[in-house]
Image (spheres, helix red, strand yellow):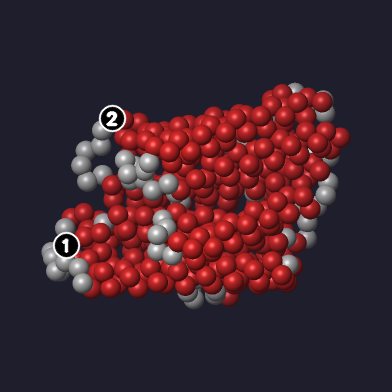
Amino acid sequence: MLNTFLSFWHGDVLVWSELVLLGVITIGTVLTLCTSRPTRKQMIIGSLSVLATAAMILADNLIVIGGAYTVLLGCAAFVLYRTYASMSKKHKTILFTLSGVAFILFAASLILNVLAGMHSSLWWQEAVSMKQLLSNASAASAQGDLRRYGFLLAGAGFVISFPIFLAKTRVSSFFATIVPVVLFINILRLKQIADATLLDDGALTNKIFLGFGITVLVAIALKFIIKKGRVQLLSLSGLEHLGLAAFMVGAGPAGMIPALFHLGGQAVGHSGLWYSTRDVEGLRSNQVIKWLTIALFASLLAVPFSVTFVSELIGIGYSLQAHLALGLVAFVAMIIFTVSIVRAVMKLLAASSNGAELAKTTKKQKILIVVLAIHVLAMFGVGGYLLTQQGIQFAVSVAQTISSL
């Protein structure tokens, strides 16, 4: 049943959820950024990015996923180069280098998986099909070393490429939200195949997810303490929530469900914030935009009835039961992160109170208000549903299905 929940074809509930998330964030990005007629290059890059992301969601073939992943890296690099003039040449070079290394790692993992499949009497087409890899995992277990290194390289490639998508650009609402979620879920798919191939009940991959998650949480908490207000708040916030999702997955099978809820919730919350924080004048002169922005910040801080509240309540609770010491460390890191975000929001309130005088709402601001309102409703509407009797029954049924594997 976990194969159905994390399957690789169109009819999967998770795939449809990703497509809906992609649609919401894409439409929001277009509405909030297209204040003037886009150029031909912008239309090409935007279309390629959306199509490549959709391909990574729907594809079963590792070659297709690799091709779509390469297109996404190229689009992100182009956008970063053209739209983020304030970034130093050194930082851009670092991000471009990481992206190149990420592609090389993913290509190497593809070669290792093909070799492992051919050694296990699979045709090369079957060796790059995720469904075939999963169905033939036990037969391929003799090639466990090739599989292990192949999946580790693919996971490392995806992780290394995260920074270029989290960089602050004019289309961060798209690249910094939906793309990391899609990459993360593809890592979960690779994890599923690796666990079945290695026949270790996920012992190795769980340790990797757990170690990565706690490292990210602690590193970001220390950065907030050392640099205080001199940080890219939304980029670090997105990375922190991805680290928390990885920590939940690494804690054990029951952590998968809150992790998936958390991934979707944080993507919606950050998407809205990337839109609103770009409009400084709107934050200062429009009270509706200001309070919708504060509501999105609050949703990411896991206030009651938000999606992240439900996911963190379940995920952190389970992590404390499975790994008490690491769970406490993660909890402390989250407290430090929360305090830092609250301080930033307080500064936002002070700045907006002392800002420009209230002005008539422009057409652009009206569109932004509608987009932000949809994001706020999604965050608290879905979270509220998960706290109802029907929502709890749904979450419990999914958790029981996974725990019975």
Per the image, label 2 sits on a secondary structure element best described as: helix
Residue at position x 70%, y 51% in the image: 208
Instruction: Give x and y (percent) for residue 128.
Output: 68, 30
Say what amino acid the circle numbered 1 marks. Answer: Thr
Mark positioned earlier in the residue sequence (1 or 2): 2
**Residue 317 image-quadrant placement:** bottom right
Three-letter code, disc 2 = Arg
Residue 268 spot, x, y in % from top left: 44, 58
Say whether marks 1 and 2 touch (CB < 8 Å): no
Badge 1: few (under 14), some or many (20 or more) residues near its Cα, within 10 Å?
A: few
Residue indicated by mark 1: 361
Look at the picture and state if 31 lies above or below 108.
below
Picture quarter containing residue 102?
Answer: top right
Instruction: Residue at the far front: name it.
Output: 226
Spatial separation of the CA atoms under disc 1 and disc 2: 30 Å
Q: What residue is pinned by disc 2?
A: 40
Q: Is residue 231 above or below residue 186?
A: below
**Left or right of 57 in this view: 21:** left
Label 1: element kind:
loop
Q: Is residue 2 visible?
A: no
Instruction: Please give the label number shown on residue 3.
Output: none
Near-viewer residue (10 or 348): 348
